[in-house]
Image (cartoon, coloured by chain):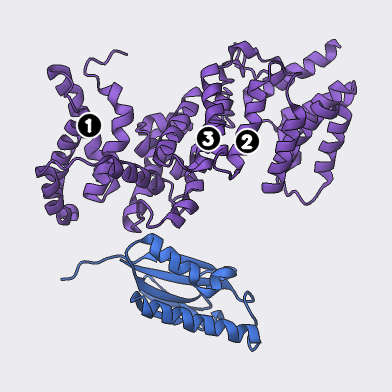
Chain colours: A blue, B purple
Amino acid sequence: MKYAILIYSGEDAGPAMGTPEQAAEMQEWFAYTEALHQAGVFVAGEPLQGRETATTVRVRDGEKVTTDGPYAETKEILGGFYLIDVDNLDEALEWAARVPSSRYGSTEVRPLMEIPGP
Amino acid sequence: MIDPSGVSEVFRSEWPRLVATLVRDVRDLELAEDVAQEAFIEAATRWHADGMPDRPGAWLLTTARRKAIDRARRSARFNDRLPELEARASREAVPTEHELIDDQLALLLGCCHPAIAPEAQVALTLRVVAGLSTAQIAKAFFVTEPTMTRRLTRSKTKIRAARIPFGVSDLETLVDRLPVVCGVIYSIFTEGHTSATTATLVRGDLCDEAIWLAELLHELVPGDPEVTGLLALMLLTDARRATRVDADGVPVLLADQVRSMWDDGKTQRGLALLAEAHAHGLIGVYQLQAAIAALHTTAPTFGDTDWPGIVKLYDVMLRRTPSAVVALNRAVAVSHADGPAVGLAAIDAIASADDLDSDLANYPYFHSSRAELLVRLDRLDEARDAFERAVDRSTNEAQARHLRRRIADLGLR
């Protein structure tokens, strides 16, 4: 079963850019991604650029409305995601707990909706 | 109620076994529960006419499997389960005792999965494991039946959609997850024991359900000292049930309870379980609470209670799980061991300590405990004031009536 691991954290949570702590955490992210590959559960995964780069689009009554910024003005923002393919929620939660930013951010696990093929 | 079919006699023990085996068969909680229920309904009419079969459990399983096969044939969702289900049904595969233990434990762990909201864990456990109807659970928790149905449906949908597994893959995970199951069972017990939401203080039905669930868990994991401790704690507490409230439903203080009316059978069983738990060498919080309950329940009179022993146990608990409520209980025990002045100083020390994060000022028991000590110190005006604060904060009508009675008593002194 496929699950999305959605990685949220506060913008100033976690180690600051350019610090040795941040360099060490980068190594953890690489190791984590590698571990997903090794376990054969990796489907996809990418980090996202910051909230200042986000644009939100809504189409209302056929009219496109574009606004600057992320959809929800929340404290923690979506910073990246993984898609993994594992047997059940317990396994997905295990992987979510190993996401480096789970120590200071919040990591949401959502099963993908399975749409039957044609 | 007379039940000529005999179904209600076997329901208690057969329900969780049947549902657990069916979950293994069909790998779907809702389907398992539905066909188990239909099998029991059929049993009620058939056994009434033909008499109870020699092996009621096997009869129920065969009947439920037949119904599950019918459903699976009609539903695309369960089509893939069909070959295995038919194979099991045709060779009348009866689960071994070992499988029954694994499957019932899996059922409990599934209902108490941390990905399910706590209130839904409680509802699911009562429905799926204890076999209560949605209407009964709704009534027990004072919500409407549609609300309870939605709560149950939402969690069952999540179990299926997010593929929440039943059971655990290794011992380490079991050790992690057992405390959640114990917590769910204990919350059912405390809801029954001191109802925060109702006018009546003791709701025996929920206490009985919780004890039954703990008995089952103890049977499934006999070697876990905390599971054993939890069962001991509930039995030793529940032994006092008959005397905890008077004829009007108003709580009776421990000092005034008629000890000869305490249930000695429950006390003895609780003590034996406590000894069994201690034999494992690991002392957990349920065992500590059980040990405290044992000292209360075995004391010949209130005055003869081993208060210094109780204070010592609270000291250990306070180190394990520091909380203002534990500290408050300890202070009350101190007041009986060393006198009301020392006890009052201990209570006031908790209120001024900021390391115990709490909402103590809003806790009615904090004010009523202070009030009782002030009464013993003959500081009646302050006692009245403290009782009134307790009344203002009480969420339980029976409790509030007791407190108002205490205020009235002060006027007579």
Same-subunit check for callouts 1 and 2? yes
Marks 1 and 2 sit apart, C-alpha to C-alpha, by: 37 Å
First of labels 3, 2 by sequence position: 3
**Above or below, comparing residue B177 to residue B190 in the picture:** below
Direction left: furthest residue: B90
Q: Which amino acid does label 2 sit on?
A: Gln
Q: Residue at x 18, y 53 (%)?
A: B78
> What's the distance in space between the residues labelled 3 and 2, CA to CA?
15 Å
Looking at the rendered structure, whether the residues under marks 3 and 2 are on a common chain is answered as: yes
Q: Quadrant of residue A73?
A: bottom right
Marks 1/3: CA distance?
31 Å
Structural crowding at the residue carrying mark 3, measured as other residues with C-alpha within 10 Å and reported as few (<14), some (14–19) or many (≥20): some
Report the residue marked by disc 1: B57
Badge 2: how crowded within 10 Å, few (<14), some, or many (20+)?
Answer: many
Q: Name the residue under label 2.
A: B289
SS under mark 1: helix
Q: Classify 10 Å Cα crowding around label 1: few (below 14), some (14-19), many (20 and above).
A: some
Q: Return the residue nearer the eye: A90 or B223.
A: B223
Q: Give the labeled residue for mark 3.
A: B276
